[in-house]
Amino acid sequence: RPNEIWYYDEERKCWTRRYESGQSREFRLALERAPKPFKYLINRKECSLSIKFSSCTAAHQVAKQLIDGRGIDPREVTVSFRFSDTALQTDPVITPFKVKSCDNEDPTNVILKEPYKLYLRQQKVVNKMLSIENSDVPFEEIEMIEHPLPGSTGLGMTSQAKRVVKLRGGVIADAIGAGKTVISIALILTGLAKARSSRVMPRSSSASLVVMPPGLLRQWKGEIEKFSPKDLKVLIIYDFEKLKKYSAKDIVNADVVLMPIDILESRQYLENLMKFAKLEKMKPYPKLPTRSGQKELNGARGVWIPSTSADPYGGANNSSNQANRNEAAYYTYIYQEAIGKIRGELKDSINAQRKGVPIEFFEWERIFVDEVHESLCTTKAEIDEAKEKDKDNFFKEKNRRAGRELLGICIKDPQKRPLVCRGAVFGLTGTPLLDSSSRVIELANLIGNTYVIGLTGHWRKLEKESSRDIFLENYLEPKQGREVRRAIFDKSQGYLDVACCRNTNEEQMAGIKLNTIKRIINMTEGEKVLYLESQKGIPKDKQSLYTTAEEFEEGTIAPFLKQNAKFKSRG
């Protein structure tokens, strides 16, 4: 596929991409000339027609879907074929996805600071996480393509590529308040000695990296101090200003690093990354896109009333969608280019004493993504629902966009993602997104790079595609028949069965007694004055005792949080 070239459009004052149309056309024609799974042989003398199936062609097509761009050895993949009658296939029976509890797991106890102890159900969750981290949980990744026999025969060949892997991540979906944080702390404690022995200057850190919505940073630090019997070295990176105070040595020698998932929202952070990567020539640096790129409609439902030949879908596709995709794609391009530089040719220029080293440079022991569902919610309905639930700590779309970029959600090769680790990646959420197979496929890819059938054609990658590539995807993407749709549902449930657990009902939550104590505490007059004075990131006319995190300008909330955490009225 011909490469895209980014250039700065002086007239429109923005970066855009272009490609040589002749090369793109030749590429499409080459695809048309590529071998097909079925070959027809006509013998005029014998008046016969023979149809041959090329297993080699089908093998290449289905294996490519599974391994392309993931840094995988093709020898790990096995391919099989089956002749089928599509008329005999049935649609899958779609039922709600289910997440099992950890009742069948053996308990693994971890000593916490007195007088705290893990409940039995929490010990079982720790054991499940350890099994994943120790590569004891197998999962069969598969991809399928149906090759219909041309004509109206209703027959075809189904090819399947599969690869057995060990899970590199999982999701803890216990109910809110069930102790996902203390379970994660227990996992950190169990592997502390191993993590500390893995320190190598200036890149390999012993720290478990925990990324989360910014409002949870101090809560995590407080929970670590509360439950850990050992003196863990915890670094909190509130923003870029705080990162500048830490050296590479500080980060490598840390046990836990806490960081907001939307740190890329800071313009200064990207500028610092570009400086480290020596890519100042790429100015002006892009701003973090505020909107998601949109998937174009390529079909119509209901009554089809074309507007014009140039707009066959009657305005359903917004003309600004491609501009949004270009904006998102350029940011990712610049971001990935810089990460590749600091990890590659420039890695020797970063020494242990250097301060402000970008987070993407380091290799972590493991990664936790708290409230993992937040960054994946992108529809207007989901965002409106989140805002209604918690107006004070509402996570805006631009924050979610920053989180998806940091997590590298569209990058197939885990070693090229912004955050890399030696161990596993764990998602923590009390409200898992399991309303569709598309959600499960996305979650599995994000948490440990597990491939669930259908990932190659997942809609999320279209957030950044060019119009040319959208055309090619529609042209290349294999159509999903009933058998493939059934396999997608089954494999999605299969992933949830082995990678996720959720303790929810009263029996599983036995041992927890809920005591609600409500106290109303007022600030002193002096504290009120300090509270208002510390709101330097908010215009004077908008400062109040009812301020929210979203009202602060970039990089100004940290002094406010530090100041008010010391108030006696806060305990």
Image: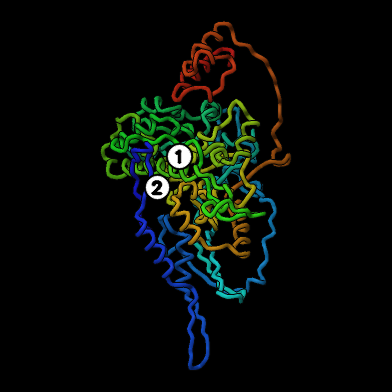
Q: Residue at x 36, y 25 (%)?
A: 245
Quadrant of the frame with the C terminus: top right
Q: Residues within 10 Å of mark 2 (few under 14, many from 20)?
A: some
Question: Secondary structure beneath disc 2?
Answer: helix
Colour scheme of this structure image?
rainbow
Q: Position of residue 506 (x, y in %)?
A: 73, 39
Label 1 environment density (alpha carbons within 10 Å; few <14, some 14–19, many ≥20): many
Front-most of 514 and 331? 331
Asked if one can make out residue 57 in the rendered structure from this viewpoint, the answer is: yes
Looking at the image, which is closer to me, 255 or 299? 299
Residue 193 located left or right of residue 113: left
Q: Reading the chain from its start, which is encountered first: label 2 or label 1?
A: 1
Q: In the rendered view, tell whether residue 45 sits above or below residue 515.
A: below
Q: Is residue 196 shown left or right of residue 376?
A: left
Q: Which residue extends farthest bottom?
A: 45
Disc number at residue 406?
Answer: 1
Circle 1 sits in a helix, a strand or a loop, which is it? helix
Front residue of 505/38: it is 38
Mark 2–mark 1 distance (CA, rounded to whole Å): 12 Å
The number of callouts visible is 2
Which residue lies most toward the right here? 506
Asked whether residue 134 is in view, the answer is: no
Q: Amino acid at mark 2?
A: Lys
Question: Could you tell me the amino acid type at mark 1?
Answer: Leu
Q: Which residue is mark 2?
A: 416
Q: Position of residue 286 (x, y in %)?
A: 39, 36
Q: Residue at x 50, y 93 (%)?
A: 46
